[in-house]
Image (cartoon, rainbow, N blue to C red):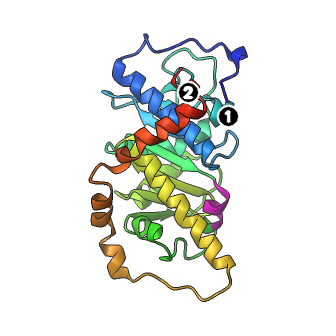
Amino acid sequence: MNAPESLAIPSMQHRVSAEEWQTRVDLAACYRLVAEFGWSDLIFTHITARVPGTEDQFLINPYGMMFDEITASSLVKIDLHGNKIEDSPFPVNPAGFTIHSAIHAVRHDAQCVLHTHSLNGVAVSAQKEGVLPLSQQSIFVLSSLAYHDYEGVALNEEEKPRLVDHFGRKTYLMLRNHGLLTVGRTIADAFLNMYIFEAACNIQIRAQAGGGELTRIPQAIIDGAQQQAKTVTKAQGGMLAWPGLLRRLDRKDPSFRQ
């Protein structure tokens, strides 16, 4: 779906650095892919990326636009407190950046933070045991997974230290009764991590719905999952699949690049 012409979004391509523009294109693509894979919750989740070369500038979705409408130029630049740095006709959701800002502030390795409220993700987050070792996808998640208990809609600044403490240096975070979160050193990495996280949850719900006895994967296999992941992706992480994902978007609707 093209961004609505009535929004008349001016191009940012020649107003920002080449590095920032590439980040904008990749982040807009990530939003489109989240919509494509059915993980969006209308307008109520967020993906953020650090502006290259900065410590305290980030890009976030324009609050109110559907994920399949978002373009590189429509993304809003904000500071660590969620304040707009540049003029934009779009608002920013204050609750949307509370969790993200907490992580960006302490995880400088996390260039991208991706959060979803998918139905199966939330369903697993409501289960006391959380992610179970039932699938190949689950072993990668379980090798670097943290949990954070639900404290209500993310508006409370006092929650940030607890969330950061629980997450630590992990890659996957299950927000209990709430949803899923991943980080990545690139936008591509954060997306691939979420793809794996979502798949693990989808498979778990289906396996449980089957009603039969479930077979759990031994801990020894989970312990070797991270090294196996590096081998499978040729140490390229999400970048191995990212060009193909962009080609998929280009075939359907290349307007994310605008």
Instruction: Describe residue 175's horizontal placement relative to residue 23 as left or right.
Output: right
| Residue 81 visible to an observer of this rendering | no
Which residue lies under the disc numbered 1? 66
Mark 2–mark 1 contact, CB under 8 Å?
A: no
Which residue appears at 51% of the width and 85% of the height?
215
Q: Position of residue 111 (x, y in %)?
A: 37, 40
Magenta span covers which residues?
A: 118-123
Main SS category, magenta section = helix
Q: Position of residue 156 (x, y in %)?
A: 58, 47
Which of the numbered marks, if any, corresponds to residue 254? 2
Q: Does the magenta segment cover residue 33? A: no
Which of the numbered marks, if any, corresponds to residue 95? none
Question: Callout 2: 10 Å neighbours few (<14), some, many (20+)?
Answer: some
The numbered mark, 2 or 1, whose residue comes first in the sequence reads: 1
Quadrant of the rendering where the N terminus is positioned: top right
Given the current orientation, which residue lies at the most extreme bottom position?
213
Which residue appears at 52% of the width and 66% of the height?
200
Quadrant of the rendering where the C terminus is positioned: top right
The one nearer the camera, 84 or 155, is: 84
Q: Say which quarter of the image contains residue 244.
A: top left
Location of residue 175 with respect to 94 vertically, above or below: below
Given the current orientation, which residue lies at the most extreme right position?
6
